Image (cartoon, helix red, strand yellow):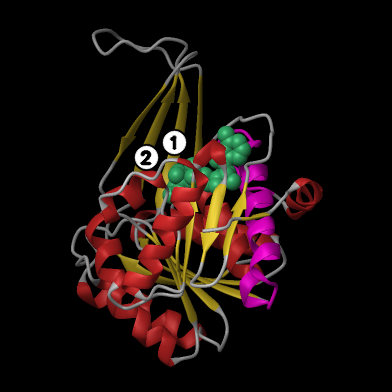
């Protein structure tokens, strides 16, 4: 069982608790915590925790190279870290008693050479039937069609590809017919111009997207309403599990990582969506940016119900 992840825009997720936050005055921080983050890192961490051989390719900014490497080693992830100048970008989350403000840095530019080095490391790790996850925004310097160019290269090696991105990056990637995409509702609407209402329309519009673009599967995630999984001949719905919600961080990444891992080991769509849904529920029930452990996911799995949707 193996999974490949690419993380071109890694970050430090800095969580600060400020009991009150007022832009016009000095604010007191009661708690601060830093976690290594970024979508591809999250998917790699979850895959490793679920027992997969997890491989990650990423640029490693010089100033944080040691810290990044130590973290990935601790998580049991095999990684290729391409040296780039600078430091990790900081994604700041300021939590007050009632709200959260998010301030995300753009990230250091990644040169075409570094982006290519990350791409060839992925190719080197490729194996038939293994999913390669292309997720997240692209750093400055990397063109919108980067994932689109990687899809045929990975397919050439027998890999399956999944894309979780937004806007132009997702649009370009679709032209190369990835095996799976995982938009949330906002991303789906920006892509299609449609606003599905209800599970039936989510499945119907996803089916039309499959037919129009040739993408293998659409896993449309609906936050607290769950997720649908639609291919040309199957439409499934997984209502979200009722769990205490502590932090929404990493929900989408957990869903995607577990779903693809399960599909690549030959589980059917139902079992794969169920594992994805259990992993996502485990992620939201943990505080902060912590990714779930295998036991957290396995404990929730028996509670997941998958429904067939007629469209
Ligand atoms: N409040 C919730 N309760 C239970 N499960 C949830 C909740 N919110 C999200 N989930 C689970 O997480 C999955 C992914 O959530 P969501 O649709 O918000 O992803 P996303 O917008 O891509 O998130 P991300 O910020 O990680 O990119 C959902 O399909 C659902 O299974
Ligand atoms: Mg998402």
Q: Is residue 59 visible?
A: no
Magenta-span inclusion, residue 192: no
Q: Residue at x 37, y 40 (%)?
A: 91
Extent of the magenta region:
263-292
Q: Residue at x 25, y 47 (%)?
A: 106
Q: Are marks 1 and 2 in contact (CB under 8 Å)?
A: yes
* Residue annotated with mark 1: 14
Q: Position of residue 22 (x, y in %)?
A: 31, 10
Work out which residue is located at the far front of the displayed protein and give it: 311
Q: Residue at x 61, y 30 (%)?
A: 246
Q: Viewer-proximal residue, 46 or 29?
A: 46
Mark 1 and ligand 1: say if the CB distance to the nearest ligand atom is below 8 Å: no
Give me the C-alpha separation between circle 1 and circle 2: 6 Å
Q: Viewer-proximal residue, 59 or 228?
A: 228
Q: Viewer-proximal residue, 156 or 122?
A: 156
* Apparent side of residue 1 relative to residue 123 in the rendered image (left or right): right
**Can you say whether 13 is above or below 210 in the image?**
above
In the picture, the disc for residue 91 is 2
SS type, badge 1: strand
* Apparent side of residue 158 relative to residue 308 in the rendered image (left or right): left
Q: Give the class, few, some or many, for how many residues have Cα within 10 Å of label 1's Cα (few <14, many ≥20).
A: many
**Can you say whether 158 is above or below 51 in the image?**
below
Q: Position of residue 90 (x, y in %)?
A: 35, 42
Q: Quadrant of residue 137?
A: bottom left
For the N terminus, the image quarter is bottom right
* Apparent side of residue 311 relative to residue 259 in the rendered image (left or right): left
Q: Position of residue 287 (x, y in %)?
A: 61, 33
**Can you say whether 236 is above or below 241 in the image?**
below
**Can you say whether 103 is above or below 139 in the image?**
above
User: Which of pointers 1 and 2 lies earlier in the amino acid sequence?
Assistant: 1
């Amino acid at each position: 069982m193996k999974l490949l992840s690419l993380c071109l825009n890694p970050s430090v997720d800095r969580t600060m608790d400020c009991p009150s936050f007022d832009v016009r005055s000095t604010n007191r921080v009661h708690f601060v915590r830093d976690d290594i983050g970024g979508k591809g890192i999250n998917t790699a961490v979850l895959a490793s925790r679920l027992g997969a051989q997890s491989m990650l390719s990423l640029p490693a900014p010089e100033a944080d190279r040691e810290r990044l490497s130590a973290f990935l080693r601790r998580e049991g992830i095999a990684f290729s870290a391409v040296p780039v100048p600078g430091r990790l970008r900081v994604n700041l989350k300021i939590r007050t008693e009632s709200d959260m403000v998010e301030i995300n840095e753009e990230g250091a530019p990644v040169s075409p050479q570094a982006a290519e080095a990350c791409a060839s490391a992925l190719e080197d790790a490729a194996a038939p039937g293994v999913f390669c996850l292309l997720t997240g925004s692209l750093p400055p310097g990397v063109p919108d069609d980067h994932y689109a160019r990687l899809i045929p290269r990975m397919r050439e090696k027998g890999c399956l590809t999944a894309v979780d991105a937004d806007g132009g990056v997702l649009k370009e990637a679709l032209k190369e017919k990835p095996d799976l995409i995982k938009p949330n509702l906002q991303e789906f609407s920006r892509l299609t111009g449609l606003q599905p209402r209800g599970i039936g329309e989510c499945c119907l519009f996803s089916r039309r997207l499959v037919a129009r673009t040739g993408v293998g599967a659409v896993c449309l995630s609906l936050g607290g309403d769950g997720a649908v999984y639609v291919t040309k001949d199957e439409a499934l719905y997984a209502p979200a599990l009722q769990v205490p919600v502590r932090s929404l961080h990493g929900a989408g990444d957990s869903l995607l990582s577990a779903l693809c891992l399960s599909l690549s080991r030959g589980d059917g769509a139902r079992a794969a969506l169920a594992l994805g849904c259990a992993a996502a529920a485990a992620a939201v029930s943990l505080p902060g940016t912590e990714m779930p452990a295998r036991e957290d996911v396995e404990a929730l799995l028996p509670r997941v119900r998958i429904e067939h949707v007629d469209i």
